[in-house]
Amino acid sequence: MSIRKKMEMDLAEEFRLTGSTTVVTGGGSGIGWETAVVFADSGAHAPVSDLDDGGAAETAAEIVEEGGQAVARRVDVSDPAAVTQLVADAETGRLDVMVNNEGRDTP
């Protein structure tokens, strides 16, 4: 085994997220999708939120299909009450990591 591969394996084990709750906004596609999948692969419960509820549902379904824990939530991050509710609904009773990835490029 190469030294690089061994280091990657050691780091992956060092940074396991087993038992953590990691909310990713904008998790329906792109960087948010990748982030949610990586967190779930690392053992985290990964609520996936997106304004596109279909995208969030697809991401969560992929995670669950691969043996991870995820749920999908449609959330408009410009609405503070919706974000507060997202955190309250995290299902584990706590929030360990939140990635604010959602964004829109509109005039």
Image (tube, rainbow, N blue to C red):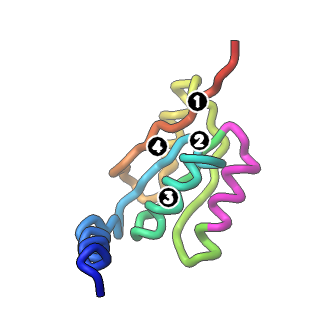
Name the residue type under label 4. Answer: Val
| Residue 106: percent from left, percent from top | 69, 18
Residue drawn at (28%, 82%), measured in percent from left and top?
2
Q: Bin the neighbour count of mark 2 within 10 Å (Cα to Cα): few under 14, some 14-19, many 20 and up.
A: many
Amino acid at pointer 1: Gly
Contact between labelled residues 2 and 3, with CB atoms less than 8 Å apart: no
Instruction: Tell whether 40 sits left or right of 53.
Output: left
Q: Which residue is mark 2?
A: 26
Q: Are marks 1 and 2 in contact (CB under 8 Å)?
A: yes
Q: Kindly give the residue lying farthest to the bottom in the view shown.
A: 1
Q: Which residue is mark 3?
A: 46
Q: Position of residue 21 (x, y in %)?
A: 40, 57
Farthest residue, direction right = 54
Q: What residue range appears in magenta?
A: 51-62
Of callouts 3 and 2, the N-terminal one: 2
Q: Residue at x 62, y 37 (%)?
A: 75
Crowd rating for badge 1 (residues with CA inside 10 Å; few <14, some 14–19, many 20+): few
Report the Cα–Cα distance between label 4 and label 2: 14 Å
Mark in front: 3 vs 4:
3
Label 2 element class: loop
Q: Badges 3 and 4: C-beta atoms under 8 Å apart? A: no
Quadrant location, the N terminus: bottom left
Q: Is residue 25 left or right of residue 10?
A: right
What residue type is disc 2 on?
Answer: Gly
Whole-angstrom CA distance, mark 1 to mark 2, is: 7 Å
Name the front one of labels 4 and 2: 2
| Gap between marks 3 and 2 measured at Cα | 12 Å
Image: 80 above or below 37? above
For the residues marked 4 and 1, what is the alpha-carbon distance in whole angstroms? 18 Å
Q: Which mark is residue 103?
A: 1
Three-letter code for the amino acid on which mark 3 is drawn: Ala
